[in-house]
Image: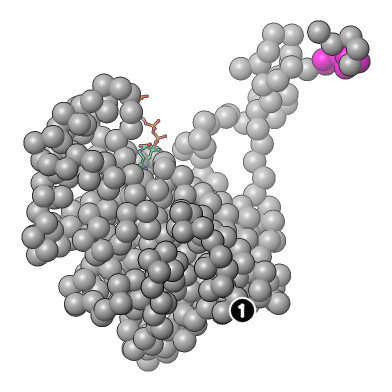
Amino acid sequence: MLESGSVPTPHAEAHKFSKGLEGVVAAETALSLVDGERSRLLYRGISIHELAVNSTYEETVFLLWNGRLPRSTELSTFQKDLAAKRTISKEIIQFLKSLPKSAHPMAVLRSAISLLGAYDPEERKIDPDSIRDKAFSLIAKFPTLIAAFKRIREGAESIESDPQLSQAADFLYRMHGKKPEMEMERAMDAYLILLADHGLNASTFSARVTASTEADIYSAVTSAIGTLKGDLHGSANQRAMEMILDIGTPEKAEKYVKDLLAHKKKVMGFGHRIYKKEDPRATAFRGIAAKLCERSGEKKWMEISNIIEKTMWREKEIPCNVDFFSASVLYILGIPVDFFTTVFAASRVAGWTAHVMEQRLANKLIRPQAEYTGPLEELYIPMEKRK
Ligand SMILES: CC(C)(COP(=O)(O)OP(=O)(O)OC[C@H]1O[C@@H](n2cnc3c(N)ncnc32)[C@H](O)[C@@H]1OP(=O)(O)O)[C@@H](O)C(=O)NCCC(=O)NCCS
């Protein structure tokens, strides 16, 4: 809206403003297709449902980065190389120990990734090979940083990575100090696969904007972590679980949701900019959560979740998103609730880094315009004359 007496700028007339960039196409990508019409998500053309059942996180990262599935020897080399990069330096461990135990794990992760850049003498290198090397190291180190801070917070010793274990199993091992059962490893792997990329979501957009200025990959990933931290994006998984725990029993679920809606509050883990009928990742997580809750004897969380979902659909026709049923999956996997978003980050770093590589291959500075709505031709009033 223009102030009276002001004139529209030429740009404002030429380009239509879209709040929240809704409906705006701001990049080209060959990485993932987010199809709201058909409620599907494809990585390099392959359905996430196929990948969640048949693939591993390592294979999915290879697929995103290379545009094709790996052959057997390629995959084992990829896994081995990734496992070899999991270690973090003494300085970084010392830094994690110096932080207040009350710090939010996402604040810790954001700072730690920035610090990895400060310790890399070749931080500024942004040629394709250097970016790929650094991306590799970042993906390997995310779980290490998260598990290390969790253990430090508990006053426990960090656990050395076991290079024989997959990224998913090693992460659970270092979080909890014991090797996970196969079903738990599979659930963790499915989580990492299903969250790995998602078109031009807000954090990926941040990463691409930062990369487009020719800043280094640590800066791009740090920007992305900061963006993921918000409740409307990645932190919705933490908020969704807090809500489920707060509800506590299935009988209280319907009223709880109705009260939130009556007070015009958002129900966390519901709604999506693109998926208006169904989020395909939520479909996958509904099944995984049901199995895990049944197996662990914690069916209550599923019962509460089902009532919340039904109530939201009946009252608002808003479907749940990726963060709703995945919250119960992380809970059953023993991840502390305030660490949920860091696990999201440990998966999405695959997409962030793939988008940074894609941006660099055909870079142009991302610099949109704002429609100016302030006054024009105001006079400068000297201090003594201001009222
Ligand atoms: C994700 C989200 C930001 C998408 O937002 P968007 O495309 O900008 O849509 P809006 O927030 O404008 O929502 C459109 C309408 O649906 C309502 N709505 C959307 N999500 C809702 C939710 N989770 N709970 C209650 N109402 C919701 C809005 O209040 C709005 O209603 P109105 O038109 O009466 O004002 C939004 O759905 C949300 O805040 N969800 C909760 C947080 C969350 O789970 N984030 C993770 C996303 S993967």
Tag 1's secondary structure? Answer: helix
Point out the quarter of the image occupied by ligand 1: top left
Residue 244 on the magenta span: no
Label 1 belongs to which residue?
129
Residue drawn 24% across the image and 64% down it: 333
**Residue 204 visible in the shown view:** no
In which quarter of the view is residue 332 placed? bottom left
Numbered range of the magenta stretch: 377-382
Q: Nearer the viewer, residue 343 or 146?
A: 146
Seen at 10% across and 40% down, the residue is 250
Residue 165 position, x and y percent, is: 32, 84
Q: Quadrant of the C terminus?
A: top right
Q: Quadrant of residue 358?
A: bottom right
Left or right: where 266 falls relative to 148? left
For this view, does 329 lie left or right of residue 119? Answer: left
Q: Height in image: 22 above or below 55?
A: above
Amino acid marked by disc 1: Asp
In the rendering, at what x and y percent does residue 58 appear? 37, 76
User: Quick check: is 379 in the magenta stretch?
Assistant: yes
Nearest the viewer among 273 and 269 is 269
